[in-house]
Amino acid sequence: MISFTQRLAEVFAEVRRGVVRLCGPLRFTSASLCVKFILLGAVAHAQRPLLPLPAQVTYEKGIYAFKTNPYQALKRQVTGPPNSQDERYRLRVTATGATLTAASNAGIQRGLATFRQLLDGSKIQFCDIQDQPRFGWRGLLLDAARHFQPVAVIKRNLDAMAAVKLNVLHWHLSDDQGFRVECRRYPRLHRAGSADGLFYTQAQVREVVRYAAARGIRVVPEFDVPSHTTSWIVAYPRLASTTDSVYAPHTGFRTTNVALDPTRETTFALLDSVLTEMSGLFPDPYFHVGGDENDGRQWRRSPRIVAFMRANKMVRADSITPDKRLLQAYFMRRVMGSLRRLGKTGIGWDEILAPDLPRPTVIESWRGPKGVAEAVRLGHPALRAHGYYLDLYQSAAAHYAADPLAGVPDSLQSRVLGGEAAMWAEFADSVVLDSRLWPRAAAVAERLWSPAALTQNVPDLYRRLAMVSDQLDKMGLQHRRAPALLLRNLAAPFPAALPALQTLTAVVEPVKEYRRHFQGFTYTTATPLTRLVDAAPAESDAARRFGATADSLLAELSLASRPAFPVAAEAAGAVGAGGPLSQPARRQLASLRQQVAAWQLATRTLPPLLVLSPSLSEYAPLAAQLGIVADLLDQRLSRLAGEPGAGAAGSPAPAGGPAPAIGALLDAAQRPVGQAELAIVGAARRLLRER
């Protein structure tokens, strides 16, 4: 077997010849596989970064300079039949020009996305790229029901989707808070179902569908039933399961546990009519009907519905207790039958999974990977959304780690269609939406497009996400500009403190998961999303970089404290905890100290603004927490630097962590303030040796 060193030498010889193959047939030894990943990182730094990573790319020596508009000069050829959805493409750049060949117009769009990333002005590296998606379904859910998203917002996010090769817009168009599409047969749905009265006209829907199609993106609508339907019942009370309540447009975000009455034929007649009208607006063969979060409490409260369940043997093993799951299954079978008659394949969330559900029904799992595995075991196509919920403010790395095939046997993996990133809009109006989507959605896009073997390098992912963020900013996305504007508005009472406010906000993140619903602030559809928590990044780049530098420094210190070769330990001169720092450690230490000094300066500058601005006063404790953490870090880093009076360089904290008082301070610093929290506390604990 070839050794790692030999293979590395071969690889670098290949690099010197100017020909680099990032991916070939997956037939390597472990040594060559390791070299492959090293090469991927090394060459990616040399070439213009691509995201998603192509399946196969060969770079060659030479640059082609376009004499005219590169997009007009690019030669394009479609080789497949007119209705093909095959997304494979080949992009070839040589001394004679650039050629893009694909089996479909969708493939041309994917190749154009790669071409755009490779372009450096009017120049492009010689290359040969042969690429295809790992999964055919790579979606993004946009929720226009809770906060209405204007057409312009949808369009610019379609542009962003095309840039990272996402190909399905899952458009969530009805929920408790509103029915957002003009319905001519039942107009009260869009007129009365929401407090704000906002909806898309049918002409606007068709416009969005055309705009998406031009970018190789399908549009799949979701009208959620039988729960999440307060807007339906406000418009047409006869749909309600109980008669003991009067419904008004719902403006809160807690689940209402309202459900349509599944026992009346009039319910299905209205549903059939609405689905018929809505399906005519969306040419895609798939149609999402939700089916999630129905706990059945309204059904159990209705004597008439309970009697229906018992009469139709929808009961548990005791033959008496009503079983809402069986009634839900009955309802979903009826709805899926309506869709089938309309030529549509139904999609539902994983709660609808039942033994007698029609096999073509697609199951989308949001509650865990087990939902995907169970769906394909029962013969259904499946999608994964769990792990891709962008509204939960998880890191790009966390989304990147979730794989649609996790837990799925090899024999059933062909039933997994792909996955979808999801952006539920409780805390995302049209102003802040982009910043909650991008660039993290691009991490999901790469997970769903690129070969699994190429998607293991998280640091390189972040490097390329920065490139994507720049690209999207130039395309007009508002993920940077909107938060910056919010901060300028917040700093208006004392503009001189704006840089300090930006420094604080850069290391703050919204609280994770669903905690924002439960921390003493009640949100409605009318609540302005203009507080510091709304300007804070979903994932703090500043905190992530600080943490990575801290970990690198700690690794250097660990290496310095134990000699690699005992016989030469004393001669090495830098092996003890108190020995001189290595050059990398000195650079890392200087970077950390510079950042800590910036935090200290910010916390000294902010108090006048926090006093003058009613919108910011609630965050005074957060600024104080940052100041305390920065001071602790300053003391620790000063000791490491060996400054006079700071203690021995590199002297560790007591075994088991710092003094209890320091641990208590860090615990306090980690507590949320105004639904936001400092993102640097974890790195601070590591630097202060907190366990």
Image (spheres, rainbow, N blue to C red):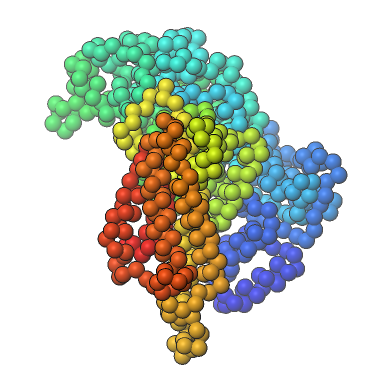
Does 674 sit above or below residue 226?
below
For this rendering, which residue is in front, 208 or 196? 196
x then y, percent, for residue 585: 52, 69
x and y, in percent, of residue 563 in the image = 45, 82
Is 116 left, or right, of 248 in this rendering?
A: right
Q: Going 59% across and 77% down the picture, which residue do you hit?
A: 5
Q: Is residue 315 above or below residue 363?
A: above
Q: Residue at x 48, y 56 (%)?
A: 596
For the point 42% across and 59% down, which residue is it? 633
Q: Could you tell me residue 253's position as x and y percent?
A: 36, 27
Question: Does residue 434 appear left or right of residue 19 in this picture?
Answer: left
- Residue 206, image quadrant: top right
User: Image quadrant for the C terminus?
Assistant: bottom left
| Residue at the bottom extreme, as displayed | 567
Residue 336 in view: no
Q: Residue at x 46, y 42 (%)?
A: 606
Residue sitting nearer the eye, 437 or 14: 437
- Quadrant where the N terminus lies? bottom right
Observer-nearest residue: 384 or 513?
513
* Whether residue 420 is situated above or below residue 281 in the rendered picture: below
